Each structure stands twice: as structure tokens, then as C-alpha cells.
Image (cartoon, rainbow, N blue to C red):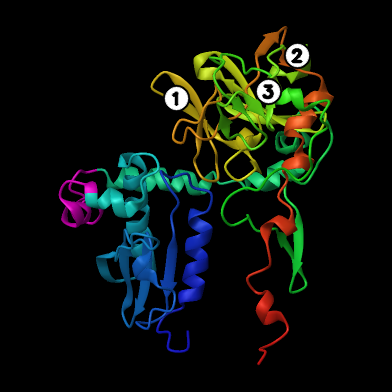
Amino acid sequence: CRYGVQDSVGFAIRIEERYRGIRAPHKIKFAVSGCVRECAEAQCKDVGLIATENGYNLYVCGNGGAKPRHADLLAVDLDEATAVRYIDRFLMYYIYTADKLTRTATWLEQSEGGLEHLKAVVIDDKLGICDELEQRMQHLVDTYKCEWKEVVENPDKRRLFRQFTNVEENEPAIEFVDERGQRRPADWPKGGVPAPNQEPDQELVQLQTFERPHSNGNGSVNGNGKISDNGKVNGKPRDTGRLKQHWVNVGRATDFPADGGAAIKYGDVQIAVYNFASRGEWYACQNMCPHMNAFVLSRGIVGTAGDEPKVACPLHKRTFSLKTGQGLADESYSVKVFPVRVEDGDVYLELPPAAQLNALLATSRHCIKAPQAGASPCAPCVGGVQG
């Protein structure tokens, strides 16, 4: 900061190192500006500090994004030690009282008494809990460990980040393109996901009619998960004969996180397997979210809609029933589901022959490719201005 009246950069580094790794109801953003010109935009952050001649002004509960909220001034002209003490109290009070997935701005707006109550708790110790809040925050600071460093150094933890639990393979789920000398993922196509990249073998296309477990038999699902109820697949009458399926061992039960999922590879198909431990149930479905052909459902959030087990896509929050595969928020999408059983600690899926499943769900058929994504929005500028 050219006009800085305090060492804002040094203080920002100390703030970052103090609060790194802390679990909170939602993400937390910090900023420290060196003067009132406010280049760091501290007044739209969860915690913002602006340097003054006498210390720092402390702002809290700001928010940018689609619904911006100007932060509230909590205290003025604080020395660094006092600012840290107030931030400790503020953050721990937020962690203990906010609902999950609630940002500080929403939390304050919903709190009875609003800013005045927050000042009374954090500054005046109205509830008599400030010592406890500081001690609990200090415990988090003292017990911090770099979880990623532990993963790198521990082979057992590295196994948790395998792409597939049943094979030592990796495969790209989206094509990368070169732009300005750098690689980036190809853009999602405008206007929705296109047809599959390859036409399936017509001898195997009957797979597109194999019935989902728990299905009511109405409708079919094509490669992009769009439901059709016209009795035809690719314009041909549906073959309702049931395909021969068999049980396939896909790993040990311990390979799948409790109340979460992991991906397995079967042929050229990615399948998400879920250990819904809190319900004592197991589920499996295709790993590709049909909304944007993203192979991410194994990393989705598992939960319930009423009594219906569901998974939410981690990208756009599309939800699907784990029993039927039906889209819950948007019924025009669905995913294929597969029966699961666990015996002697081994997990089995009931699956059709790999060649048949490949004809419908092979990664190579649905991976987003650069030609589908269209020209780069920067393409007209690459060669310079014309005319």
C-alpha cells in the first residue's frame, strides 16, 4: 500500500496463518487494507480490517456475490492484539451459533439484536463466555496440522484420493485445450449437453432399455439421462427382454467413506458407490451427472428428501433419488442405478456385461470435447483487431 499507515501485509499474513484450517459453517473471507483507499475491499468480507493512524478498524459480516452486503463496523482503532482477540471471539461465536451453510452476513441478519447484540457479546462479554471462546480458538490454532501434507506423506491417506477404488488407473473426464500457451478444461457447451460423441454399436444399443432397479418400468433413459416415454430408443421399438446381469466385486467396504461415495471403473464406465452408513444402506449409480456430463456424482453430497435417499451433484446441486435414479428437482434428468450387496466385507454390484454397459455410459462417449464446446470467446481477439 503506497499510502499505508500500518504494516497491513504483515498483519494479513499473521491473520491468515492463525485461522488457516478452521472448520466453520461456511467459507470465510478476510481482507486487510493499509489505508482508507481500501484496495483490499475489506468492507465486503466476513472479517475486514482497515488500517488507521491509531490501529485498525474491524468490520464483520460483509458479503459480495449475487447479494452483496456492506460489512458492519464492530470496533475502531484497535491494536493488533486486541483485533485478534475480537476476531477469535467473533469467529467462535459464529461457529457455535450459526446453522450449517450459513454465511456470516445471513447469520447476523437473522440474529436477534443484530449488530448491537454481537458487540455486547464480543466486546462487552454480555454472556460471560469470552474467555471460553478465546480458549477454544487457541486450541484450534495450537492443534492445526496441514492435512494435505499428511496425505502426501501417508500412503494410506493417499489411497483415499484415488480416482477409482477398484483399479490403479486414472482417466480424464473432460478434454483440455490450449489457450494463450496454457492448458484449461474445455468449456461446457452453450445450450446444454450435446449428443454422445460416438454412435453406440447397434448390436449393443439394446442396453439403453435395461430396466433400473426399483423402476416402475415407465420411460427409458438415454445416454444423457433424458427420459423418454415413447416406447422407443434411437427411434426403434424398445426391446423389453431383460439382459443377463451378474454380481461384480468392486472392492472392500472400507474403501468407501461412511455417508459418502467413491467411484469404481467397470469396463469404460464410471460408477459411483455410496456407503449410506447412517441408514445402514448401500447404493450405486452412474458417476456422470447428466446435466452437464460431469463425472462427479461419487463426490456428491448424500442425504435424504423426506425418507428418499438422494445424492446432490457437487457442481450444480442437481439431486437424484438413489433408489430410482429419478431427478428430484428436475424430473427431465435421471441416472441409472444398480443393486448393491455387501458380503464378508466385500462390495458387489449387479451389472450387465461390460461391453453392453459401455455402449450406453462409456466415459469416452460422454466426455466433453473441445469441438462441442465451440470457439473460445477470446478467439476473435487472438489475431488482433481486424478492419
Amino acid beneath label 1: Thr
Amino acid beneath label 2: Leu
The answer to whether any part of residue 273 appears in the image is no
The answer to whether any part of residue 150 appears in the image is yes
Depth check, mark 1 against mark 3: the one in front is 3
- The mark that comes first in sequence, 2 or 3, is 3
- The mark that comes first in sequence, 1 or 2, is 2
Which residue is at the front of the view, 19 or 101? 101
Decide: few, some or many residues near mark 1? Use Cα within 10 Å; few <14, some 14-19, many ≥20: some
| Residue at image location 72% in from the left, 7% down from the top | 344
Residue under pointer 3: 237
Q: Regarding mark 3 in the picture, which secondary structure is present there?
A: strand
Range of residues picked out in magenta: 110-128
Q: Residue 327, how many percent across, how many down?
A: 50, 31
- Magenta stretch contains residue 82: no
Residue 243 disc label: 2
Task: State the CA–CA distance, disc 1 to disc 3.
Answer: 36 Å
| Residue at image location 72% in from the left, 12% down from the top | 241
Which residue is at the front of the view, 135 or 376? 376
Instruction: Determine whether 280 is above or below 128 in the image.
Output: above
In the image, is 193 to the left or to the right of 16? right
Which residue is at the front of the view, 77 or 40? 40
Residue under pointer 1: 304
